[in-house]
Amino acid sequence: MPRTYDVDSVTTDAAVAGAAKPTDTRELTRLARVALIVAAQRRTTLTVRELGLAIGISGVELRPVLHLVLTELAEQCVAEQMPSLPALVINAQTGAPGHGWPSCNAAWFSEAQQVFRRWGGPDRPGLRRAN
């Protein structure tokens, strides 16, 4: 049975509330998924730094940890036959896509648009509105 997410009112702050500093890659991936779904609902992207802050990591550990997290999340997206949420992660200086995308090409743009349609539309699959 598909998992149902109730993320209409979730913020990235709420996603990490109470979590001291998650170190389990699965937990970090879960937090990244929530943060990127919220970004998709808002039809926006997140910088590498913003995603790091959303999942509770920063500094020198940011890049290697995010590489592991985004790789795991991309694999989950493929397994679930949904657009790749990591397409919404960009470089703050250049605005170029990060993990797994060689450039701001048509394939990346198309994938980001698919993510927005999947999570940002009125009939989002796998979601239910909070009462």
Image (cartoon, rainbow, N blue to C red):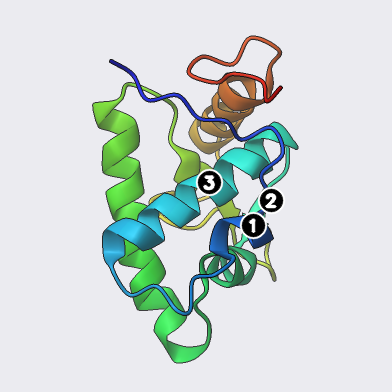
Q: Quadrant of the N terminus?
A: top left
Give the residue type at disc 3.
Answer: Val
- Which label is found at residue 34? 3
Whether residue 95 is situated above or below residue 101 in the rendered picture: below
Q: Which residue is mark 2?
A: 11
Residue 5, how many percent across, how many down?
50, 30
Q: Residues within 10 Å of mark 3 (few under 14, many from 20)?
A: many
Give the residue type at disc 2.
Answer: Thr
Task: Give the residue drawn at x 52%, y 88%.
Answer: 59
2 or 3: tag closer to the N-terminus: 2
On the image, which quarter does residue 81 sit in?
A: top left
Q: Is residue 117 left or right of residue 4?
A: right
Q: Which residue is mark 1?
A: 14
Residues under labels 2 and 3: Cα distance?
A: 8 Å
Give the residue type at disc 1.
Answer: Ala
Q: Is residue 102 visible?
A: no
Task: Give the residue drawn at x 64%, y 36%.
Answer: 40
Residue 42, how many percent across, how many down?
75, 37
Depth check: give the residue in front, 12 or 58. Answer: 12
Q: Is residue 3 left or right of residue 6?
A: left
Residues under labels 1 and 3: Cα distance?
A: 10 Å
Residue ranking furthest to the bottom: 60
